[in-house]
Every structure is written in structure tokens, then in C-alpha cells.
Image: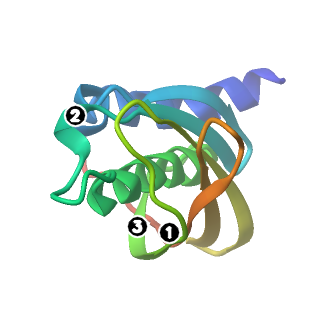
Amino acid sequence: MTTSDVDHFRVAEEMFAEDLASRRLGIEILEIGNGSAAARMAVTAEMVNGHGITHGGYVFLLADSTFALACNSHGRPAVAARADIRFLRPTRVGAVLTATATERSRFGRNGIYDVAVRDSAGTVIAEFRGDSREIAVSS
């Protein structure tokens, strides 16, 4: 890893440090790379719906937070322009979910990222795709 990489990753790390929603849910950064990231979250009793399965909003939030880390790993602030998710399998209280984001394309100020969310057995439980847009930061 070069000094330049560390500087780029700092934008993602600083963004996450200010993301109280993600941090209060216990999401932790596992890895940040050039256009990639991984994060983890344990499912608590407060995160399940009336069917006793993990509420989709929490799965989406984990995927979205991991996407944000990946698209901010290039040293320029970026936000979601669009995102969608496919829920494939349910999880329950006590599950530890890991999301891994991978950059698929980057052009101009835009990017496309895929995020796979897996349970502790490594089974993909959701697939997320996000489009990013770099933004200008006002001083």
C-alpha cells in the first residue's frame, strides 16, 4: 500500500467516522481497498421484523455503508446516485453478516459497484448494486 492509497482511504474512513447510523448499528470496517471494501454487522433482536427475520432495511444499510466505503476509497467524496438490492435468503438474530463491495466501472465522476452480503457460512443472502457520483465539497 502506498502513501497515496492511505490518503485516499482517509476520505472513506473520515466519512464513516461521521456516519452515526452505521456505527450505532455496530457496523465495523474490515477492509478498504482501491474501489473495494468489506464491513461486518451482527444482527440483534432490534433488527428483526414481525416474521423473526432480519429486516431488509438493515441488510440494505450494511450493503449501502460498504458501498459508500468503496466509492469513497479514491480520495474524492462520493454519494449514491442509485441503489437496489435483491434479498436471496433470510437471516435471524445472532447472524453475523459480512458485506463485500467491488467496483465494476468508474468513468468521469460516476461509478458502479456490486456488494454481496453473506452470512457466517459464506452463503450470499443479498446482492446490491449501487451507482455513485463524486461530489464537490463546499468550504
Residue 39, disc = none
At label 3, which amino acid type do we have?
Answer: Ala
Which residue does the numbered mark 1 point to in the structure image?
132
Give how far across and how far down residue 56 sits, in percent: 32, 62
At label 1, which amino acid type do we have?
Answer: Ser
Taking the image as shown, residue 138 lies to the left or right of residue 83, namely: left
Q: Residue at x 38, y 59 (%)?
A: 60
Q: Residue at x 34, y 36 (%)?
A: 93
CB under 8 Å between discs 2 and 3: no
Q: Which part of the image, by quadrant, shows the C terminus?
A: top left
Return the residue found at the far front: 51
Which of marks 1 and 3 precedes in the sequence? 3
Disc 2 to disc 1, how far (Cα)? 32 Å
Disc 3 residue crowd, few under 14, some 14–19, many 20+, Cα 10 Å: some
Which residue does the numbered mark 2 point to in the structure image?
45
CB under 8 Å between discs 2 and 1: no
Q: Residue at x 63, y 75 (%)?
A: 108
In this orientation, which residue lies closer to the viewer: 117 or 67?
A: 117
Above or below for 14 versus 47: above
At label 2, which amino acid type do we have?
Answer: Ala
Query: Residue 3 is drawn in which quadrant?
Result: top right
Residue 80, disc = 3
CB under 8 Å between discs 3 and 1: yes
Task: Give SS at disc 2.
Answer: helix
Q: Residue at x 71, y 57 (%)?
A: 102
